[in-house]
Amino acid sequence: MTEVEEVAKRSLFLAEKYLNEGKPGRCYAHLLIVLKLKPQWKDKLEKLFINSLNSWDKYLLTEGRYSDLFTCYEQALEHYRHPLLYNNLGSLLYRLNFKKEAGKYFQLATAVNSEYLPALKNLYRFYNESVERWHFRMLNDSNRNKCYRNAILKKIKQGHKTIIDIGTGTGLLSIYAKLEGAEIVYACDYSENMIDIANQVVSSNLNPDSIVIIPKMSNDITIPSDIPYRCSLVVTEVMDAAVFGERILQTLLHAWEKLLPSPSATFPYRVIPHKAMIYIAPVQCLKIARLNQVLGEERNIIRAINFGNIRFIPIKTEPYDTENLRIVEYSCLSDTVEIISVNFNDFSEMELIIDGSKDIENFIINCNREGFIDAIAVWFDLYLDNEIILSSSPKVSHDCCWDQAIFPLVKPKFIQDQSLIKINASFKDGELRIVLIDVPDTDEILTPVPQEIIKFLNCTSLHSIFHETIIKLKESWPLLELCEVLDLSPFPIMGLLLAKYVKVNVTYISEIIHLFSILKSNNITSNFEHILWKKFIESYDSLALKFDIIILNYLLDSGEFNEEIISNLPNIRQCLKPNGIIIPSNVKICCKLVYSEQLLRESQVINPELISEIKVADYINIFKVPYHLDFRINEINYKTLSDFTMGLLNIDALSSEEPTIFEKDLKLNEDGIFNAILCWNELDIYGSCFSTDVHDSYINHTAWLLNQSIEVKKNDLIKIKCIYQQSFLYFSTKKC
């Protein structure tokens, strides 16, 4: 044996010894020596090396030794091009807010292994954060694009030759301006990623210097530092579903003050869009109601739990929600009513709106249909000039990029035909707020909770299954009386139902004030104890208490797997008594093979104009992601080729760090084309099945979009592969 081999073997012995002793840093250092002396041992050392670096990584991260961490990964990547190393380094950079650099390492990880799910999940998260998904819908709205282009052309023909595009995004409106004859175009955006995309789009379609792209908000642009003089025309589309949400009034007031000349007889209108007319209507919509009210007898829903005078309302961080009423069942309870119009070419009018002078009180609406007012819906007509008009009305095409703004009610309000209602509307500080003012007062205690809890409490289909389960447990399980229950659901409904039948001790994690008032309303005398989730996870191994029944929440309301619960499943299972039960016991993956243009339009640019005539798609579609979350299957347009069950995930598979692979050969019964797999789940609850496809499910659905649509014939065989790993699902398909 040579001296080099002796040193290498001695270092390997010490590396294994130090790893077993919990000293990963020393282990890692000795492995580097071994790899330097004996690079041909690389393959057999890979697993040991990765394990030691993983442990050392966690220690250095805890100590905040980031410089040492980066050094370790630089050394590691000299020896191994392993996707885990790239992914870990990307995750570290992401944590330190170097997101663009992190994205490159996630891409490197997936280049090494295209099915390495931890890196794919991180890469898609990076893409989602880099480019907001509404960009795709907007760019695919060909009517919007055509109208803006025509409006810009008309202004240029009138003599407007210098243009500022505020909130340029991909730079499309700036390119329209240049193609239609503008002499000088300035474009600005605050998003670093969109500025990068805009630069690429402009360079691909025009002389790179033909449009000056400024990486700033327009309110930060100054003359002459950023632009040399006031420009003739502003083009913008900084509007949301309620017009004002993107601060368009503040943006245009600044533009009129600092970036545009005053209106003149020749050029009285210097802003596209010219004006907006905003409309409202009270609507009845069960979907909206389920998101904002815990429904009861007023909607023919009988509840097993009496909440007494406690009314749960959703915690809100925004003044309104949005909903695409074009694809949701709803009914207007009145004619559409104009609430306000705003002229973006009138500085004084915008000032009056923003300072609150145009706020409206006691605005009366005549309702011509009976029903529940679940919300006040808002949409608009956008006049790009006096002739070219866009509308976000729910009655226009499905391809419109704008949804409607929704001001939901948190209390039930039923009205008769020909009833009058009153609302207050505020526009102060450029923020639309609408309140229905004649909702009767009650002695209810309004209790804000996360919206997921409202949805969970409205999922009476699941509550019925819980009820069935309790009856089965009473009949077959002698341990039910005085058993210990851990309820990790959004709200401890199962624990409450159990406590109505037998004396139990319930530990729950949902942070709910007034729970003891609910116990009193239901004559429940069982003991309920709250524990913070974080505290539970930190102290599970020191808990003296073990549980007979553990109720888990495997799925988030978005349809995603609940990573926080699932990653802690091994720890949670240690809290279960030997003969205890876990509910649900497994998760079934149910699928449809479909074609859906709607999903395609919402995930990537497919507009022919922006693929061939003006090259935009190539640069923004880099950020497309194949999975869709948080939608209902019955609210999208699709054609089904086949329904199938992909596989069953038990608790071991759910919690394993290793991938679980399902493969299925699917024989098709008809000709067609497919581009997506729609997914929902079935949960096994003590022998009963809860499907997330039921009408009142609090869990939404997901979809996986293929890279390319696939044409098929009857009797064709499609091989479908599904990988589950660390709370993430991946699909691939192949025509055999």
Image: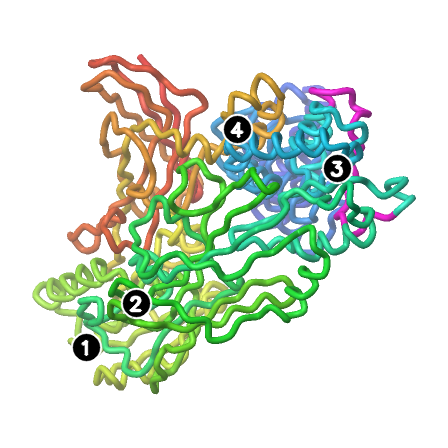
Residue behind mark 2: 547
Residue behind mark 1: 500
Mark 2 or mark 1, whichever is nearer to me: 1
Residue behind mark 3: 187
For the point 31% across and 61% down, which residue is it?
333
Residues packed near mark 1 inside 10 Å, few (<14), some (14 to 19) or many (20 plus): some
Tell me the distance, in whole angstroms, between the alpha carbons under discs 2 and 3: 61 Å
Task: Determine the secondary structure under disc 1.
Answer: helix
653 up-or-down from 476: above or below = above
Mark 1 or mark 4: name the one nearer the start of the chain.
1
Q: Is residue 122 visible?
A: no
Please say whether residue 212 is one of the residues in the magenta stretch: yes
Range shown magenta: 203-222
In what quadrant of the picture does the C terminus appear?
top left
For the point 26% across and 66% down, which residue is it?
548
Residue behind mark 4: 605
Q: Is residue 479 visible?
A: yes
For the point 36% across and 29% down, which residue is it?
676
Q: Quadrant of residue 210?
A: top right
Residue type highlighted by circle 4? Val
708 up-or-down from 573: above or below = above
Mark 1 or mark 4, whichever is nearer to me: 4
The answer to whether 556 appears left or right of 476 in the picture is right
